[in-house]
Structures are given as C-alpha cells and as structure tokens.
Amino acid sequence: AALLAGGALAALLVQVRSGDVVEAGKLLTAVAQLTDEQTSRTLQNVEEGVQSVQEILAAAERRAARAAASPSFAAEVPTTESIDAQLRKLAASRPYLLAIRVLDRQGHAIYNSVAGQTGLDLSDRAYFTERRSRPETGFAFGVPLKNRPAGKWVMPATQTVYAADADFAGVILAAVDPLFFNRVWTLDQAIPTLSVTLFRTDGIMLMRSPVDEELIGKSYSSGTIFKKVASGATTGTF
C-alpha cells in the first residue's frame, strides 16, 4: 500500500509492504502524518531562509547607496566578510542546510556561508543555467546532485537575484542536505518494509529512505501515482 501527500513544492510518498491492506492503511496514515508535517515545515523553512538572504542583499544595497550619497555613512558600506558572516549565521540555525551561496551573473560565488569558497565557479550547474535562461522562475528545488568541494549530495533550492534595472544579476543558492530527511524520517521502532520518498511534483525523486543513491534525481513522472497527481490528486491511498 502507498499513501501520497502532495503540496505546492513536493509530494511525499509513504509505502509499506503488507498482506493486510487494512493494517497497512492504518500504519501509512500514522507514519504519513508524522513525516508530512516535518517535511513540509522543513521545505517551508528553506524557502524562508532564501527570503532572508534576499533581505540581507537588499539591506546591503540600501547601505551602499546611502554611503554613496553621503560620506558620513561610509562606515556602513557592507563588505564580503560582513555578508558572509550573516549567511553563516543563517545556515548555522538551519541544520538541513550545507551551505548558502550568492552567485553573480557569471555563476561565481560572491558571498558564501562556507569559508574559503568565495569565487567558486558554479556557472555550469543546471540550477544556474536554467535560472539564467528563465529568471522569472520563482523559488524552486532543483534536481539533487553531488557538490564539488566535498562530493556530498545536495538538493539545490534557488531564487533569482535581480539588478536595479530588473535584469538578471545572479542566483541565491541554498544547498539542502537530502540526508537530513533520512534522519528525520527514522522511527523509534524500525518498520522493515517501510519506505518514504520525497518527489518534486513533476516526478523527480529528491530523497528516499532507505537511501538509494542510484534513484536520487531520477524521474518517475510516468508512474501511476504521478499520473494521478497530474490529474489533480493531492492525497490518496493506493
């Protein structure tokens, strides 16, 4: 049996193998309530974190403009170090984030929560090139990939940075640790046949527990459950 809980950003699929459909349905409902609430809250917090970065950048622009207009405000000019420090504080308060970066229009990290990675070239990453091509795209989770510095799986959450003239100026990147969900979804009493999977609503697998790295990032849009999602279903037991 499988239970689907859908939202605006992602769909959570909870499955258990059991010969007793009624028993399995009750178990799925209980587990789904626990996992869906925590997962939804985490995804929302990621978006709120990206919004906080937008506010940090906007405040920095205001201070720089004030300093340019009057020498008496010269001490307010933001520095790379001061913005990096704010990003580090933001990331430290969110255990599911591996890093927060701001990329310029060329795809280079100009601000970074991770020390020593300013200037990192991420211009070839799909989450950058796709957003550069379609900057109007709203906040979104990208396809999971392994990051270059450490070879760890990350789930990119991105938002466009705009210049004063509304042109594309870069990308805010929050690197989410997909293994965080594996820890969150772990029950006090293990259920051997239980699996929990997080998909984007287009069918891309973002994370699965038990972890199977070969499945992360693959599309399951042609599956039965996502055909139901495409037809408008947001929840259900199958």
Image (tube, grey):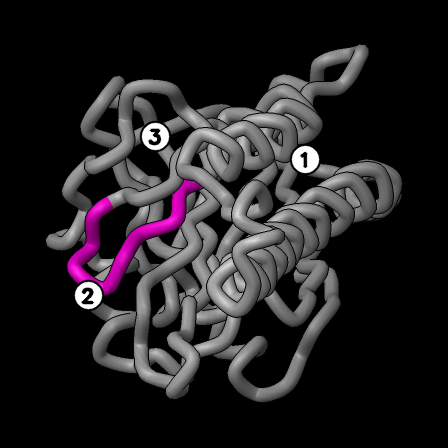
Circle 2 sits on which residue? 129
Residue type marked 1: Ser
Residue 52 location (% of width, % of height): 65, 52
Please tell me whether mark 3 or mark 1 is closer to you in this view. 3
Relative to 58, is 110 on the left or the right? left
Q: Is residue 141 above or below residue 173?
A: below
Identity, as a three-letter code, of the amino acid under mark 2:
Thr
Highlighted range, magenta? 101-108
Q: Nearer the viewer, residue 227 or 20?
A: 227
Q: Residues within 10 Å of mark 1 (few under 14, many from 20)?
A: few
Q: Secondary structure at mark 2?
A: helix
Quadrant in which residue 101 is drawn: top left
Residue at image position (57%, 78%) is: 228
State the separation of the CA atoms marked 1 and 2.
44 Å
Q: Which sits in the foreground, 118 or 97?
A: 118
Q: Which mark is residue 18?
A: 1
The residue under the point 66% across, 61% down is: 238
Residue 205 visible to the viewer: yes
